[in-house]
Image (cartoon, rainbow, N blue to C red):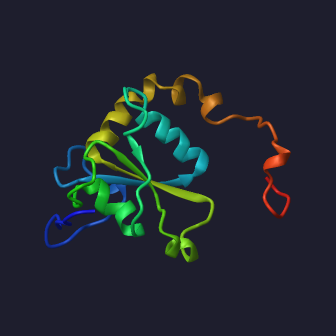
Amino acid sequence: MGKITPLGKYVIIRPCSDLVNEDPGVKSILCFGTAEHIRNMCALVHFRSINPFSDVLVPQGASCSAFVSYASGMVETAPPNAVFLGPCDPTGNSWFPQEWLSLAMPIKIARRMAEDLESSFIVKRPSVAYPEQRIPLPHLTRPNGLL
């Protein structure tokens, strides 16, 4: 993955609710959600994209890489204009909720997504983003028989 350069003496992780609008120290945003939430966010990442193959990446690495290192710019070879879906590290399976995913993004992409929200399908077609009725797919059931 290349050289890892710390951002400073400390990396501070805190809730977004604690942030000031233009906090110059913010490098990235980390979101957790169900597959549906993360799919919608990935679609929002692609809202003004011209390349569907480079904006959302699923790189291998430790969970902390997927959560912090890649999106914050600490990893030399991590693309600066991508968001990172994760975690792919199976050692996190014992503590990371099995129904969740994460999406880490550089702050400039998070701001762009916020700007695009009102024009996106999430606001204009919320029934697509969060359908009230779902079509069951019986052949895609889990081993316990539940969808």
In this rendering, the answer to whether 49 lies above or below 10 is above
Residue 127's x, y, as percent? 65, 29
127 relative position to 105: left or right: right
- Nearer the observer, 118 or 62: 62
Residue sitting farthest toward the left: 8
Residue visible at 59% across and 24% down in the picture:
125
In this rendering, the answer to whether 90 lies above or below 113 is below
Total labels drawn: 0
Q: Quadrant of residue 82?
A: top left
- Nearer the observer, 74 or 2: 2
Residue visible at 20% across and 58% down in the picture:
76
Q: Quadrant of residue 65?
A: bottom left
Residue visible at 37% across and 35% down in the picture:
114
128 relative position to 28: left or right: right
In this rendering, the answer to whether 80 lies above or below 125 is below
Residue 92's x, y, as percent? 51, 73
Residue 62's x, y, as percent? 40, 70
In this rendering, the answer to whether 18 lies above or below 40 is below
Residue 83's x, y, as percent? 37, 47
Q: Quadrant of the N terminus?
A: bottom left
Residue visible at 22% across and 55% down in the picture:
73
